[in-house]
Image: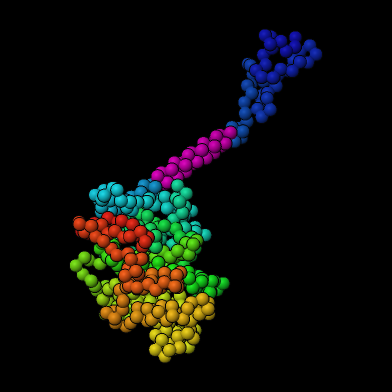
Amino acid sequence: MGCNPTKNDCSDICINTPGSYNCSCPPGTEGDGRKHGRSCVAPPHALKQSMLIRVTTGTGLGILFLLIGSAWLYWGYQKRKIINLREKFFKQNGGLLLKQQLSSHDTTVEVAKIFTADELEKATDNYDESRILGRGGYGIVYKGILSDNRMVAIKKSRIVDEGQFEQFINEVVILSQIHHKNVVKLLGCCLETEVPLLVCEFVSNGTLFHHIHDEGHKSSISWENRLRIATETAVALDYLHSAASPPIIHRDIKSSNILLDENYMAKVSDFGASRLVPLDQTQFTTLVQGTLGYLDPEYFHTSQLTEESDVYSFGIILVELLTGRKALEFERPEKERNLATHFVTSMKEDNVSEILEGRVLNECSKNQLQEVAQLAKRCLSVKGEERPTMKEVAMELVGLKTSNKHPWVEQNLEETEYLLGETSVSNNGNNIVYDSLKNQVVIPLDSGR
């Protein structure tokens, strides 16, 4: 009879035998395998195992989807939280005021750009340690690469003063309009962080401090370059004091805040401690800020901030360029620890040549050394009223620099003034125009700001 499909009654498996057939069940089931007998079914323990697998699989998938859903919700919550926090910081840091200032400003003049926190995080590789350019009392400076491949310096301050945000915004607007080849350009800021970030022009060759004090660089700068660096720094400070409206007092002039580009051109940087001088005031009281060794002794005692405070600090830089010594050196004998005191004393005792750097002595004429040393001494006068103005300092250095190039020419005062250039003010009093010989440009500034 065999396993004829139409004549056997096997429900699952049919096995032919001589003259007949047998029915059987698939592996993992039990029964006689016949349609009208005991059907093939899974044993009780297998049913339980199958049910357990299904329950476990379903539970696992459910938990997985729950975790994915929870993670997505948490990520969304965190993102919204970050967005809200950035919006809070933006308003708290004066972002609305800055937007208003920028929108009402003359569109023909380049002003500060407002960067987002994401832009600067991407530019600094999330503020990676390898991007740090330097650390100072006011904060950390990072090297950043913007989306357009521009290299910038991003300053992350350590200090937040919630009462000064309106003044900070005004300073950002005004400083961003300063276009001078010897002043580091302020490109913009980011207000979406707890402490505002400043974005500035990147200067590639380090600081003046690095080139005259760090091991391996001592005596590396020629006298000609030193005199040019001093001249460019003085002209820049004169510009800030005289041409900016309102005038700007730097308050932290030191060799580590003078940056050098690949051609050793000087650029005054780090306006973290700077203050704008009210148009109707020549001095005002402020908290004592600055760097020991460079700090105006008169300002330290009276807290009266004047332009002469910058003159004193510049005098220290002049002495650093002459001697190659640091403003403060505690490892030296007590009478030599303070560079300003030691230099002035040496001048009075007529033995200043003993502390001048060897390369300076070899490359600079005796007459020029005497003139620069005397200028530095005047800048370091204890009384601010006895110091020259930055304009006078700049004029004198420009004259010395010119005579250094052309020693056969005696520059008189009128020629020096011409080379430096006199400021000329347009009829409305707002545009400060500098002659091209001074390497200045026209900068319209709102004097009512």
Which residue occupies the extreme right position in the image? 18
Q: Is residue 70 magenta?
A: yes
Residue 16 vs residue 418: left or right?
right
At horizontal 32% and vertical 83% (from top left) the residue drawn is 382
Q: Where, by quadrant of the figure, is residue 191 drawn?
A: bottom left
58 and 425: which is toward the camera:
425
Main SS class of the magenta portion in the image: helix
Query: Residue 409, relative to residue 243: is it above or below?
Result: below
x 19%, y 67%: residue: 280
The residue sitting at the front extreme is 408
Front residue of 438 and 164:
438
Rendered position, 41 above or below 20: below
Residue 241 visible? yes
Who's the residue at 41% across and 78% down the image?
A: 372
User: Depth check: 4 or 137 in front?
Assistant: 137
Give x and y (percent) for residue 377: 37, 81
The percent position of residue 75, horizontal first and vertical second, equals 42, 46
Q: Quadrant of the N terminus?
A: top right
Decide which of 393, 126 is in the foreground and name it: 393
Whether residue 74 is in magenta: the answer is yes
In the rendered image, is residue 252 in sight?
A: no
Residue 89 rendering spot, x and y as whole percentages: 32, 55
Q: Is residue 193 left or right of residue 133?
A: left
Image check: 24 left or right of 162?
right
Image coordinates for residue 427, horizontal then vertical, percent = 20, 57
The chosen color scheme is: rainbow
Q: Magenta segment, which residues?
A: 50-76
Q: In this rendering, would 92 be left or right of 327? A: left
* Quadrant of the rendered image containing residue 272: bottom left
